[in-house]
Image (spheres, rainbow, N blue to C red):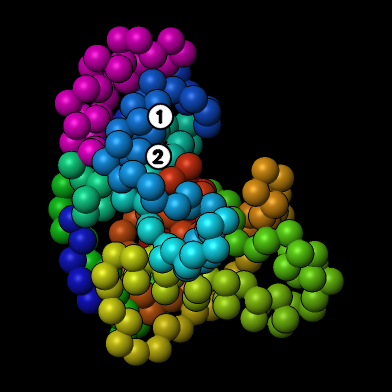
Amino acid sequence: MINLDYLLLSLKTDNEVSVGPSEICSYLSSEYNRRFPKRPPDNNSVNNTNNDGKSHAYFYPRVQYKVIRGGPIIAAVNEGCELLWSLYDKLDQLNAVQPDWKIVEKRLIDRKAPMGLTRDFIKYRFLTPWLSLPEEAFKKYLLMDEEARQKMVIKSLEGHIKSIAESLGCPLDGELRIKMNIKANYIFQREIHVAGLFGSFLANFEMPNFLGIGKSVSRGFGTIKQL
C-alpha cells in the first residue's frame, strides 16, 4: 500500500456542461503536454509497442478531466497536482472567456490517498464507460456465454489495474482478486475501435474515487467511485 498525492477539483456551473472543448480543457491539454512531453497517448492502457517499434511503459495520466452529471471534475495524482493547482489559480481568468457556462462554485480536496492491495473486497461502480475491449475481442465477447464473458472482462480489468499500479510505483505483493457485474448495454468508440462497458466490480485493491481505469482516462472514460 502506498499514499498518493491526490487533488480533486469539482466545479458547479450555472448551465449543464457537455463533454467537449472548453477553455479549461484547452488549458489542461497545453499545460499537460508542456509538463509531460513525449508521453504515449493513453489510448493504450497497458504496456505496449508504439509505431517506432520500441516498447513503451504505460504512463498513467496524472491529470484527468471528466464531466459527471453535467459538472466538470478534474482529478490529479502525484506530479499532476502541481498542474491542477496552476489551473485553480487561473479559474477566474478562464471563467471570464468561457462562453457556454460559468463557474458559480468550486470545491477542492487535497489529501493523501491510499492505493494498493487490501484484505477485503472494495466495491466500485463505473460512472463513465470503461473502454476495455478492442474491436476484435469485443466481437468474440458478444458471441460468448456469460462465464466466458466474465473471464474476458476480469482479465482485461486485471491488466488495467496492474498497469496503473506499476505506473504509479505501487507494488502488488499478493494476488489481485476481481469479481464483475457488467451490464448488457455498451458503447463503441469508433476512432480508437474499442468497446465501452458499464457496470460495477469488486476488487481487493484500493484507489481514489474519480480516477479512471482503461483507455482514454484523461478524457474521462472509465471513471470509478467506491460504493
Which disc, if any, is residue 65?
2
Task: Please identify the residue farthest to the bottom as the structure is shown.
Answer: 174
- Residue 90 position in % (x across, y down): 21, 22
In whole angstroms, how far apart are the C-alphas of marks 2 and 1?
7 Å
Q: What residue type is labelled 1?
A: Cys
In depth, the one of 189 and 39 nearer the eye is 39
- Residue 226 position in % (x across, y down): 38, 61
Task: Please identify the residue farthest to the right as the structure is shown.
Answer: 143
Point out the image quarter for the C terminus: bottom left
**Residue topped by disc 1:** 25
Examine the rendering and report whether any part of residue 212 can be seen: yes
Point out the image quarter for the N terminus: bottom left
Name the image quarter holding residue 103: top left
Q: In this view, does 27 lie to the left or right of 19?
A: left
Name the image quarter holding residue 142: bottom right
Q: Give the range drawn in magenta.
A: 83-107
Q: Which residue is drawn at 45% across and 83% down?
A: 177
Q: In this view, does 21 lie to the left or right of 206?
A: right
